[in-house]
């Protein structure tokens, strides 16, 4: 079955293109993920969506298609989801630090992301360096949680078809809708999940704002540190909290403006070994955690408490 009819709808340029409804989006994305269409059709679809940008309905359908083909993880307690798909280029990647600080509070934390990126230091690299093995099955996630540790699962394990779609980037040179979908996935069953959704460009933040409300998500939306779902250790970013899709200003954090009085003590190098040692020293109490990251931890814990009460 081809997808030319769908490409014709979304591929008429920025002004002429129309959006798919949820059912159409779920169908076409499922065909793309299952490789039921040619590479040429997949490339054309990705380029068309890149130009048009995803509507809320399309994102909903895309996410449904991906979740139907992915690993499902059961929990009886609310879970925090940390999608980690950008890595570090200039600053230490502290997503693993956020995960460990939350786990220390008794929070089930699931980090998911890519295994490798030749241009960046990934969270997968850091977890591996810390001796935290990547989860291969749901049981591995459950065992990590029982030890009060965060669990890391690669997108190759979480949703292999979506992992293959992400790899198309290395062929065509551009990100596609899969890179948006992967940060919005919810693989958790049996309870609610708090998604920490990061974005790199303001237009994505505006788009996610409407989408999270539409689907009634529990989420924290923020401009990530180099795209990662962790607060910039130097300056508190704006973090918007949604509970059941409703904006909750009292659970959100305001962006810190003005000049910095002092910089946090961060490692001078950003490689996985140096970052892992730094994270271990913070978790053990040998070094202080950056204040913005501590505030993010506190905000997440408060949001989870509100979720449990509602």
Image: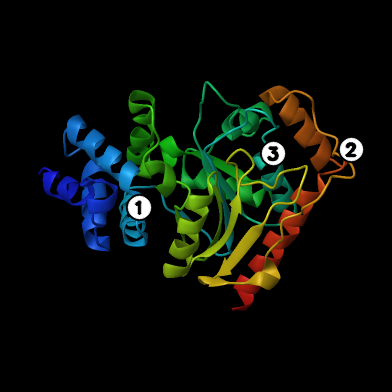
Asked whether disc 1 touches disc 3, contact meaning CB atoms under 8 Å apart, the reply is: no
User: Could you classify mark 2 by the number of other residues whose Cα lies within 10 Å: few (under 14), some (14-19), or many (20 or more)?
Assistant: few
Q: Residue furthest bottom?
A: 310
Question: Residue 272: which quarter of the image?
Answer: top right
Q: Is residue 9 left or right of residue 288?
A: left
Is label 3 in a helix, a strand or a loop? loop
Nearer the observer, disc 2 or disc 1?
Answer: 1
| Badge number at residue 286 | 2
| Badge number at residue 54 | 1
Residue 229 vs residue 260, the one in the foreground: 260
Q: Residue furthest left?
A: 1
Q: Is residue 240 left or right of residue 54?
A: right
User: Could you classify mark 1 by the number of other residues whose Cα lies within 10 Å: few (under 14), some (14-19), or many (20 or more)?
Assistant: many
Instruction: Indicate the position of residue 106 as horizontal and vertical percent values.
Output: 71, 57
Earlier in the chain: of badge 3 and badge 2, it is 3
Q: Is residue 228 left or right of residue 8?
A: right
Residue 255's place in the image compared with 276, above or below, is below
Residue 153 vs residue 224, the one in the foreground: 224
What residue lies at 71% left-to-right and 23% top-to-bottom?
273
Distance between mark 1 and mark 3 Cα atoms: 29 Å
Earlier in the chain: of badge 1 and badge 3, it is 1
């Amino acid at each position: 079955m081809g997808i030319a009819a769908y490409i014709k709808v979304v591929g008429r340029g920025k002004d002429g293109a129309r959006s798919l409804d949820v059912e159409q989006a779920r169908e076409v994305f499922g065909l793309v993920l299952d490789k039921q269409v040619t590479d040429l059709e997949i490339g054309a679809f990705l380029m068309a969506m890149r130009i048009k940008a995803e509507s809320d309905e399309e994102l909903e359908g895309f996410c449904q298609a991906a979740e139907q083909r992915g690993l499902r993880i059961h929990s009886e307690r609310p879970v925090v989801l940390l999608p980690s798909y950008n890595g570090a280029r200039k600053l230490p990647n502290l997503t693993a630090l956020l995960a460990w600080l939350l786990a220390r509070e008794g929070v089930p934390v699931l980090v998911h992301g890519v295994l490798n990126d030749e241009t960046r230091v990934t969270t997968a690299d850091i977890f591996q360096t810390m001796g935290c093995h990547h989860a291969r099955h749901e049981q591995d996630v459950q065992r990590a949680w029982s030890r009060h540790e965060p669990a890391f699962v690669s997108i190759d394990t979480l949703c292999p078809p979506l992992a293959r779609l992400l790899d198309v980037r290395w062929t065509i040179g551009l990100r596609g809708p899969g890179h948006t979908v992967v940060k919005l996935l919810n693989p958790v069953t049996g309870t609610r999940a708090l998604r920490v959704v990061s974005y790199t460009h303001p237009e994505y933040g505006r788009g996610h704002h409407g989408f999270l409300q539409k689907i009634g998500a529990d989420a924290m939306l923020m401009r990530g540190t180099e795209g990662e779902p962790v607060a910039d250790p130097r300056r508190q970013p704006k973090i918007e909290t949604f509970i059941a899709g409703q904006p909750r200003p009292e659970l959100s954090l305001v962006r810190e403006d003005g000049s910095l009085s002092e910089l946090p003590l961060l490692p001078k190098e950003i490689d996985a070994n140096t970052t892992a040692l730094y994270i271990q020293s913070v978790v053990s109490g040998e070094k202080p955690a950056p204040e913005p990251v501590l505030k993010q931890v506190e905000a997440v814990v408060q949001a989870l408490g509100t979720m449990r009460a509602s």
